[in-house]
Amino acid sequence: MKIEEVSSTTKSARVAAHSHIKGLGLDEDGFAEPMAMGLVGQEKAREASGLIVDMIRSKKMAGRAVLLAGAPGTGKTALALAIAQELGSKVPFCPMVGSEVYSAEVKKTEVLMENCRRAIGLRIKETKEVYEGEVTELTPEEKPDPLGGANKIISGVQISLKTTKGTKTLKLAPSIYESLQKEKVSTGDVIYIEANSGAAKRVGRSDQYATEFDLEAEAYVPIPKGDVHKKKEVVQDVSLHDLDMANANPKGGNDIASLIGQFSKSRKTEVTDKLRGEINKVVNRYIDQGVAELVPGVLFIDEVHMLDIECFTYLNRVLESPLSPIVVVATNRGICTIRGTDINAPHGIPVDLLDRMVIMRTLPYSVEDIVTILQIRADTESLAIEDDALQMLGEIGSGASLRYAVQLLTPSAILAKTCGREAITKDDVSEIDGIFFDARASAKLLVENADKYIS
């Protein structure tokens, strides 16, 4: 008798550099716990981030900027991602790197503005009349083709929808039947059809068809309550950039030039200030009418010292505009030259922009903090490691960098597995550390052997 274990259909998530970050790890009073939600240490910076999250939620932070300043490997990006986790998926979070603005196709300021618009959300509330229920009958009605021949065409479709309160039979137009076919609707599916537009949407399979042996990756939903014909409030979340793109790229006509243009390679085009101004007017009108609600999100610019004086000047304007996101920037530079000038400034940022920022400082981690972070990373990557090996990695990280110590985890695990061991030992870490170099050791080697390299 052969027995095979059925593997789960759940997708395995890729382990990234900050997969272990789940939030800021603050208690109910807003004080940072020593180790919580994947973050370790940096208590003051985490508590300051908690205050910023509260201000963003209360919508009192729009048009302001935060600077995360600290040495490399002190958790600046992790803090920004923790802020995003705390805000949730409904608040837009747009990450970018300073070097992204140097595009060959569009202006630097256009890239900045585009990302700013991505970070501003609009929650549109709309009341629609819909027919909603479980499909109990789906019968297309056919008639002879008026052009002649043996073919038949769909003249309509008869559909029966069932809810907990009753059943209703509808006769729909052929165009709605086509949209039902695109959604792959069949008997037993839960759907809703908008009364005004005729748009049909498949919600999922009725949970009455669910069985414990069903291995299909199907979303089962309960039968809708209430009447089949009802008024439903639909909430749609879009960003201002989505509105810009929808209006900047209208569908082409039926002439030859339009058809050729559709097949040619599309280049990235800039959205004009005039179009953005018109969209802003419509958005403000919707907000005044209570139809829509503005959701200021977060624009996170990592390596902000890579921006030049033109971009910094543009950021000043962005922060003072009526529709502005919360700008969070991070840098690991001290006193350095502002790109595009000969002026030295703190963090490579002009002083007038620094005046508009609140600055949070991240401090280097202690050996104990590094050991704790390494343990969290080992658990995230499902690696077994002995305590003395963990302590040795912590000391290596203190002498070199936290990133280097984290990067040694996986090679050490592979070496241990090659030697037939389940857990990483101190000898594995020592051997891997002898094979690879950290940045400081490599720089020292370059200085000692400068005559052997081309310079």
Image: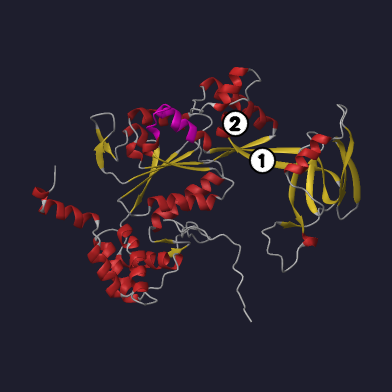
Residue 380 x %, y % = 45, 65
Q: Nearer the viewer, residue 294 or 418?
A: 418
Image quarter for residue 337?
top left
Amino acid under disc 2: Leu
Crowdedness of circle 2 by 10 Å Cα count: few (<14), some, many (20+)? some
Can you name the residue that lies furthest to the bottom here?
1
Point 36% across, 34% down: residue: 353
Amino acid under disc 1: Gln
Which portion, as a residue range, is magenta?
101-115
Helix, strand, or loop for circle 1? strand
Q: Which mark is residue 243?
A: 2
Q: Nearer the viewer, residue 99 or 136?
A: 136
Whether residue 114 appears in magenta in the rendering, the answer is yes
In which quadrant will I find the N terminus?
Answer: bottom right
Image quarter for residue 120?
top right
Residue 366 x %, y % = 30, 63
Residue 42 x %, y % = 38, 57
